Amino acid sequence: MKQARYYIKTGKQTIRCTLCPHSCLLIPGDTGRCRVRHNHEGTLFTRSYGVVSGFGIDPIEKKPLYHYFPGSRILSVGSYGCNLRCLWCQNAHISQCGIDRQPEEKKSPAEALESASNSGGIGLAYTYNEPVVFFEWMMETARLVNDAGLKNVVVTNGYINPEPLAEWLELCHAFNVDLKSFSDEFYRKYTTGSIQPVLNTLAAIAGSGLHLEITFLVIAGMNDNARDFEKMVQWIANTLGTDVVLHINRYFPSWRLNVPATPINVMQRLEDVARKYLQRVYLGNVPHGYRSS
Ligand code: SF4
């Protein structure tokens, strides 16, 4: 365990984590909703510091980032835990389980930098599970990667408070942010989060001029209402810019959600709507013949 950042004392041994909008209030022995930040005798520790769940070189398009050094490769790293609990999580085996039951492979920030430098890729992508919840290790590593002239890429749900987000924006170069719906009710019902912090994160990234791509996973019958989707892409165009890249990804049954895979015609209907407002729209998780260009 390593002492965490971003928390305040609210009592003799009671603390509130301020890293993400959940603001977990923790008495000694408690672990936050993310399952990795833990109150030990009145101090907040991160239990996942340097604990690696996956480490591998990928095409940058797999993040997905289609307009950031296209054709390049990037080393990807992830850990355990998540601050959301989406019913369809495709990485629930690492995001939704306690760290105690995981085999521990550890890497220091210096070791991660060395691997990134030797990988032949453009840098390091923080992905697989939610990078917000391994913030301390990520930021220490990102500083080394940045100083070495390599790139930091973040794949995130965007559920982070403004102060740590400002640190991200200083050291990271490109982001793919999940936007799961344009409805706060949807966020609260199916993810345990809320939408406004995610919108704030998107606006801050776009406002900083960093590279931003958005992924929207379409689940038929749950977030494919054409009017709501149109409001969402209008907001993206008006607030973030018409050149922000939108990936419309197809849902397949996963973890605790077992509704049928999203039909291709639903994807195409939303793609048509998005193209009215945005210049760069792609379908993902679809057979090759359907891929947008
Ligand atoms: S990062 Fe974890 S402990 Fe901190 S507020 Fe978010 S869910 Fe709670």
Image (cartoon, rainbow, N blue to C red):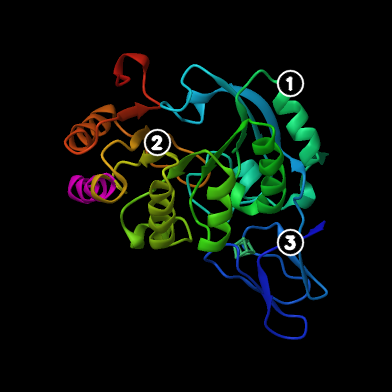
Q: Residue at x 24, y 32 (%)?
A: 271
| Nearer-N-terminus badge (3/2) | 3
Q: Which residue is mark 1?
A: 118
Q: Residue at x 79, y 76 (%)?
A: 42
Helix, strand or loop status at disc 3: loop
* Other-residue count near label 1 (Cα within 10 Å), few / some / many at <14 / 14–19 / ≥20: few
The residue furthest top is: 289
Helix, strand or loop status at disc 1: helix
As drawn, is 212 to the left or to the right of 102? left
Locate residue 278: give its quadrant.
Answer: top left
The amino acid on which the numbered mark 3 sits, given as a three-letter code, is: Ala
Residue 246 in view of the camera: yes
Q: Nearer the viewer, residue 213 or 287?
A: 213
Q: Is mark 3 within 8 Å of ligand 1?
A: no
Residues at marks 3 and 2, CA–CA distance in whole angstroms: 35 Å
Quadrant showing the N terminus: bottom right
Q: Nearer the viewer, residue 228 or 162?
A: 162
The magenta segment: 224-236
The residue furthest bottom is: 11
Residues at marks 1 and 3, CA–CA distance in whole angstroms: 29 Å
Q: How many marks?
A: 3
The amino acid on which the numbered mark 2 sits, given as a three-letter code, is: Tyr
Locate residue 50: give its quadrant.
Answer: top right
Helix, strand or loop status at disc 2: loop
Residue 245 vs 10, above or below: the answer is above
Q: Which residue is mark 2?
A: 251
Disc sitting over residue 96 in the figure? none
Q: Is mark 2 within 8 Å of ligand 1?
A: no
